[in-house]
Amino acid sequence: MSIEIRNLRKIFGGFVALDNIDLAIKEGELVALLGLSGSGKTTLLRIIAGLEAPDAGSIHFRGADAGSLSVRDRRIGFVFQHYALFRHMTVFENVAFGLRVQPRGSRPSESAIRAKVHELLRMVQLDFMAHRYPSQLSGGQRQRVALARTLAIEPRILLLDEPFGSLDARVRQELRRWLRRLHRQLGITCVFVTHDQDEALELADRVVVMNAGRIEQIGSPEDVYHHPANAFVASFLGNVNLFHGRIEDGRVYLGNTSLEVGAANGSVASASGRAMLYVRPHLLEIDRVSAGPGSFPATVKSVNAAGPQVRIELVAEWGDPVSVDLGHDRFTTLELAPGAKVFLSPKENRVFVYEA
Amino acid sequence: MFENFGFTGANAPHSRRVGVGEPPGVRRALLAITFAFLGLFLFLPLAAVFTEAFAKGLGVYLAAISSQEARAAIRLTLTTAAIAVPLNVGFGLAAAWLVARFEFPGKQFLATLIDLPFSVSPVISGMLFVLLLGVRTPMGEWLADHGLRIIFAEPGIVLATIFVTFPIAARELIPVMQASGQDEEEAAIVLGASGFQMFTRVTLPNVRWGVVYGVVLCAARAMGEFGAVSVVSGHIRGATNTMPLYVEILYNDYEFSAAFAVASLLALLSIVTLTLKHAVGRRVASQIKHAGEELPRLAA
């Protein structure tokens, strides 16, 4: 089911939790709401579910205003951050809950309920746990029960609040892949909240980057990563080196260095004033000799070679710390050690001009 | 009053570390003092009650507790408890729900108000009802005109008992309700439950041991209440005497064996209550602990 959010606003006792939110989610899309805690992402999710009422603005499901729809009538699946399993019920009864509370007329028969619950439990590979209580399950198992319970009511939209937030890294990876598969199978509209950029970039069709109650950027994972709309998105997504300087005549001045503003920055090149320059660590070329006007001197401070790439921490000629990621091959050829004088040249950069 | 259920106990070390704590001599002395105190003020009087009750033999004991007046007192006590306890639990659930689930101005004041009957002397509580509903008051007159007698009658006893007991269940349920949290209730609603279904299938089962605990404590207090009931009862034998009042009357009439016989029944009720309280209290603590275990995950 498609969701359209128009001009949404939510205030909690003087604190603006959401401001001016416009968002359209297409049928069958998998969307991530990405932001730090306090950015309003969970509030937005709860408003879509009907657990909170907006102070202004409206939500439309398939074009119809949902303002008057109660939580029950929305038929939205909501997976809570801490699962919120009914702790006094077995796994089976947890999954059966949504079916058992249906009005007498539409409630399936006992045998139909049994069949459906077992089918769902098989799907999440927990059929053998049907008679256990939530407290006897691991975190990942609880998460899967919570999903099965939600899917039992055949929701038109699936909302997940930090679905993998409290799981350890390995289980998280596994469940991520599993959720992706499930989404493809069921084709259900999914919105999930996360503070983990990797999770959002890996899983979602589209990422909504939120900050302080506002949407900073909406786009595909490639879009928001490679073409951040503003300084916040650039620094929030992935590791990044940030330099403060001045922009003039299409060049950014940092200490004794001036760098050409990359073509990807568009009209910013013609601006002038204080500017921030962002360069991702893997987009910095490292060399023993200067590679021309686009490169600047730096001193190696430390080296960490444990991992798929070598992470080198340096100090730029004007005093700012710089991180560089490079391949092991290149690292071996360069023979870098702390104290080494090198030259860095950005392959690509993003420049944002301060608002006056 | 609401913050006395910390979760720190769950993480406290269980074993006594070497080098920390009191030397064995001090420990033994503390134990001895505790048991001496308990023996002097608890076991000795309790033993005395039963010894005195059976001092003139089993026949006298049975006659004392099966006399018409004694049976009337027992019936009135049980009836009063049977009315006061459900009302108390109903009020307790409503108050706990309100305090645990909603934010509103004056919440702390309400919590203090709930505790009021505990801080007022029971005799004063009884006096309040006499001054409010007594025969010579406007309200009492109006009630009398309509053939309703409250003071010096059973309704007065029930009212006074409800008043002195009403904080009990609420006090037990508020921390349990707060610890059980709102997530499961929201999950129930999202899954399509009605408010009533949510309450009966999720909220109530989650606080059920708190409810049982409240019932036990409230029943004990309702059956044992003396002061407030004494003021409103009028001490009419066979009509408005509860068990504690009847004990006093027998004692004042120098019928010591009979007085202790009835007292022994009250003591038995207390022992049963204490046992139940102990059994249920442990489950309540573990329920709060279980709810609390979910909390540290928030840090992730």
Image: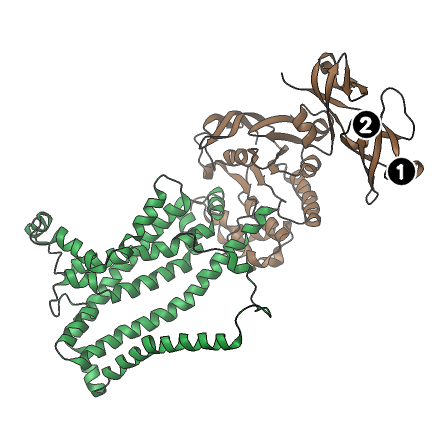
Q: Residue furthest right?
A: A333
Indicate the quadrant where residue A331 lies. Answer: top right
CB under 8 Å between discs 2 and 1 = no
Indicate the quadrant where residue B262 lies. Answer: bottom left
Distance in Å between CA atoms under marks 2 and 1: 17 Å
Compared across the picture, whether A253 is left or right of B53 comes to: right
Nearer mark to the viewer, of 2 and 1: 2
The percent coordinates of residue B199 (x first, y second) are 40, 49
In this view, the residue in front, A178 or A356, is A356
Q: Name which residue lies at 67% across and 49% down.
A: A168
Element marked by disc 1: loop
User: Nearer the N terminus, badge 2 or badge 1?
Assistant: 2
Chain A drawn colour: brown
In this view, the residue in front, A35 or B6, is B6
The percent coordinates of residue B219 (x first, y second) are 30, 64
Q: Residues within 10 Å of mark 2 (few under 14, many from 20)?
A: some
- The chain coloured green in the image: B
